[in-house]
Image: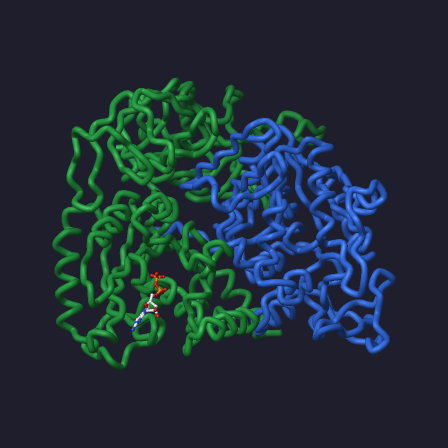
Chain colours: A green, B blue
Amino acid sequence: MGDNNTDSKGYLDMELLRFSTAGSVDDGKSTLIGRLLYDSKSIFEDQYEAIEESSKRKGDENVNLALLTDGLRDEREQGITIDVAYRYFATPRRKFIIADTPGHIQYTRNMVTGASTANLAIILVDARKGVVEQTYRHTFIASLLGIPHIVFCINKMDLVDYDEKVYQKIKEEVEAFSSKLDVKDIRFIPISALKGDNVVNQSKNMSWFKGGTLLYVLENIHIGSDHNHIDCRFPVQHVIRPHSDKYHDYRGYAGRISGGVFKPGDDVLVLPSGFSSKIKSIDSFNGELDEAFAPMSVTMQLEDDIDISRGDMIVRDQNRPNVGQDVDIMLCWLNQKALTPNGKYGIRHTTNEARCLIKNIQYKVDINTLHRLEDDKNIGMNDIARVTLRTTKPLLYDKYTRNRDTGSVILIDESTHETVGAGMII
Amino acid sequence: MKSYNLTHLKELEAEAIFIIREVAAQFENPAILFSGGKDSITVAHLARKAFYPAKVPFPLVHIDTGHNFPETIEFRDKFIGEMGAKLLVGSVQESIDEGKVAEEKGYNASRNGLQTVTLLDTIEKYKFDACLGGARRDEEKARAKERFFSHRDEFGQWDPKNQRPELWNLFNGKKNFGENFRVFPISNWTEMDVWQYILMEGIELPSLYFAHKREVFERDGTIMAKCDFIEQKDSEDTINKTVRFRTIGDMTCTGAVESSASTLEDIIEEVAASRLTERGTRADDKRSEAAMEDRKKQGYF
Ligand SMILES: Nc1nc2c(ncn2[C@@H]2O[C@H](COP(=O)(O)OP(=O)(O)O)[C@@H](O)[C@H]2O)c(=O)[nH]1
């Protein structure tokens, strides 16, 4: 019994790390994920048996670990991955959520989706091929999406005799172009996903590499500052009114904290109305809380009876978000149907909903060279462009680089209701 | 500087509560699909936390195959009573009586596949526009790409090729007339997360999850509970065993495992050491590698 308790306790102390994986087709992404799952003992017997069976059927002599991450049947039949798939594994230190995003040229949209919530991105580079166009693209998207940590895995080192020079050359090339991008933390690891070098176990073939294995980095990288704990932002999601005798006058503002730290007694300001009040209590099912911070879901009561509804934001007086109807965004287009210049779309931002007009397409980005294409206003699926929007009501926003939650929007087609665009506020 | 860090269970909880509240805000007539299994119990518990001190503003819907373990029904009524929520039952027996579906025949007959029709009829009858469910992405390959807000067409079908991208914390619940959503607040949880959370929160579970003595028989390597709903072959002897169930479904297709785990701590230890996924004990998935995907496309949970 004693042991169990420590186990459970350990489990209660674990952190969550979300990461995305990107690479060109055949760089070894599926093999790498399979290797991580397998070497960290996250594979169940029946799963392993199923892929052993499939490998045999396909005439593979090795058990193809890549099959572990194969998704839907259509894709299995076509032998490609076409959508973001999520995988899970855990070590005693952390639980990991992998957003597995396919690397094909046409799937920028998937990488953007998978990267939107990631703490870390793994970008694969084939050691034989070195830096290719897609490496630029993946790095650019990771930096655009504000992923705090990027780990470049130089894969298939076994095919270049585990040569340090090959690794160094790729590393220098990546460093040269990534210095122009906004990335906080970049690391490099030479690996062989197929043979297992430096994935979970330290490589015996590359004693020249002094850094930690990929799993070591995933387990130890500091993620405590990945959320904004400075600017207090509480977008009201839902108003709780119990209508019961016991809680007759109760009026709680439920939501998920997007930034900063809130405490009972804090002076706060409610936007857009501009009314001031004080936090009376921060409530949860398990009792009142002394403080609340991102990304907690809580319910707040204020001292004063003011009219607050979904889409409003509770902030501090001396640290306010921008308020405005004209916003510039970097827009990633996600839909087959191209962006309509001067078109109208639904827009979602925090818990707010409005409509918007595409006022101006400033330029499109060539995502392979990062050049601005000022004359190209044709924004189709997977394109990235800088766009000016005019919204029907003011948004309460921060720059995306400051806060990913209060700086992001999605655009919705008003006839099909599909999510067609993802925007990062500049 | 003080570090503001949530443990992974707290972060998963915060995410799930956010999703559940988003359902309340974006939909007019949501419901929680409640099977009496640990995952849907966890979702119901999270819903309670999400709206506290108010009551959960959605009814709980149980699709009753008529082949439930009696323990499940007993637990269901007690649990929902304590929550103060409303229970709505969709009956597979009724769907059979009305001739909408035909009962399977033979030794492996199960009503599991029939549930889909009853579920879709129930959704239509009550005009639910969003149904919260306890599915997790780690359960099965086909679920790895499932969204939190999963769009269903007017026939209740899922189109895996045409899913809406989901970014950041921005969920798009817009729909056309007749369409609806399935919403999965615990998408990102693993089996272990659910167990640890149940332990952390002290959530009550049906007794079936814990080791008990039961009359069982073996079929194709799976231990099945002896019951009136399954035709046993002559070669399938009834024996007494100490077993427990890792998932709770229909009696005809839910296998037991031999186990002496009688507390949550024991179960967690067993799950940690276990080498079979929990779906490995469900006969319905074994029918083919892509079984789950086929059923999902038709509108299964
Ligand atoms: N020699 C060698 N082959 C590898 C390595 N990683 C992957 N491969 C092979 O490269 C091919 C493509 O790998 P896969 O994981 O399917 O690539 P993906 O398209 O990026 O998912 C497969 O034949 C793998 O066996 C490696 O480290 N060394």
At 54% from the left edge and 45% from the top edge, which residue is drawn? B16
At 37% from the left edge and 46% from the top edge, which residue is drawn? A110
Where residue A244 appears, as percent x and y from the top left, is 70, 29
Where residue A126 appears, as percent x and y from the top left, is 24, 64
On screen, A291 above or below B9? above
Q: Does residue B190 appear in the picture of this structure?
A: yes
Residue furthest bottom as drawn: A204
Q: Quadrant of ligand 1?
A: bottom left
| A100 horizontally vs A238: left or right | left
Front position in the image: A122 or A213: A122
Front position in the image: B290 or B52: B290
Where residue B100 appears, as percent x and y from the top left, is 78, 42
On screen, A17 above or below B220? above
* Displayed quadrant of residue B245: bottom right
* Displayed quadrant of residue B175: top right
Q: Quadrant of the N terminus of chain A?
A: bottom right
| A369 horizontally vs B83: left or right | left
Where residue B294 appears, as percent x and y from the top left, is 60, 52
| B23 horizontally vs B217: left or right | left
On screen, B101 above or below A398? below
Q: Does residue B239 appear in the picture of this structure?
A: no
Q: Quadrant of the C terminus of chain A?
A: top left
At 33% from the left edge and 29% from the top edge, which residue is drawn? A339
Total labels drawn: 0
On screen, A15 above or below A367? below
Front position in the image: B195 or A369: A369
Front position in the image: A40 or A295: A40
At 74% from the left edge and 43% from the top edge, which residue is drawn? B118
